Image (tube, rainbow, N blue to C red):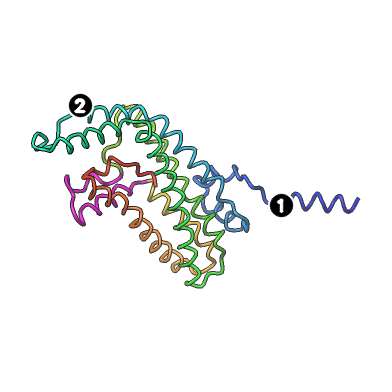
Amino acid sequence: MTEELDLDLTQEEQPRRWRFDWILPTFLRPRRTFVQIAEQEKPAWLLPMLLLSLLILINILVIGPVRREAALMNMSGELPPGYEWWLPEEQARYQETISKSAGFFSIYVTPLLGSLGGLWIAWFLLGSILHLGLTLGGSRSSNTSALNLTAWASLPLGVRILVQTIAVLASRSLVKTPGLSGFAAAEPAGFSAFLAALLALIDIYLIWQFVLLLVGVVPVAGIARGKAWIITAIVFLLILALRALPGFIGMQLSGLNTGGGFFYF
């Protein structure tokens, strides 16, 4: 009888793997929720990461037809300046590139892989570098705790995906100037292009994510609040700059504006 009672208590004490009960409280009662997340010694990042991945998949599938319509319109639009003077091989290459932009791979596969890759890589780098910074600052928290924190603090990005999906369906047009990229120069070059790619990432949902990180890092790190906040801000800005590099490189290589990509993460 005693052994059965001990077994029942042990089973009750085991942490639940799927904490669906943390999703809404992350938005409504973040301080209390992140204290619970900080107390979790085992990985608890899988649920929010899978949820964000599912939202990305739904977004890509839903707005795919809109993206294809935009690609077909570009095919029938004006030709580049001096097109008539191009060599036949160059013209053929251009037409082939334009036609591929409306294909299944460009409409669905490339955006899906790019967005999912951006999500998981950014999460892992943010959590790992944050753990390194906190450790150098005197924290004794684990890398798992930092990964849990960054995963749950990223849930506002899921709200961004939902809002963007609804906006695209309502307007039947893609988001041309994501984030604050509308403040960038019309044809950015050099550092202005990097700034445009950086501004494209900044919106209310990114700020929301940053605020949740500040709320959650204090119970996770176990060090002075000011020190934890400074380390988090430095790491967050570093990751933000790294995330802007692909958009910057894409603009330099292809001359596309920031609205041509998929800046979920």
Q: Is residue 187 magenta?
A: yes
Q: Residues within 10 Å of mark 2 (few under 14, many from 20)?
A: few
Determine the secondary structure under disc 1: loop
Q: Nearer the viewer, residue 207 or 18?
A: 18
Query: Does residue 255 sit above or below 175 in this rendering?
Result: below
Residue depicted at x 21% and y 36%: 94
Q: Nearer the viewer, residue 209 or 90?
A: 90
What is the distance, in whole Å, between disc 2 and disc 1 at their CAs?
61 Å
Q: For the magenta stretch, what is the residue range?
A: 179-204
Instruction: Tell me if 11 is positioned left or right of 101 in this view.
Output: right
Of callouts 2 and 1, the N-terminal one? 1
The image quarter containing residue 40 is bottom right
Q: Can you tell which mark lies on residue 76?
A: 2
Q: How many labels, in total?
A: 2
Q: Can you tell which mark lies on residue 79?
A: none
Residue depicted at x 49% and y 60%: 217
Disc 1: which residue: 14
Query: Residue 203 in the image: x percent, y percent?
Result: 33, 46
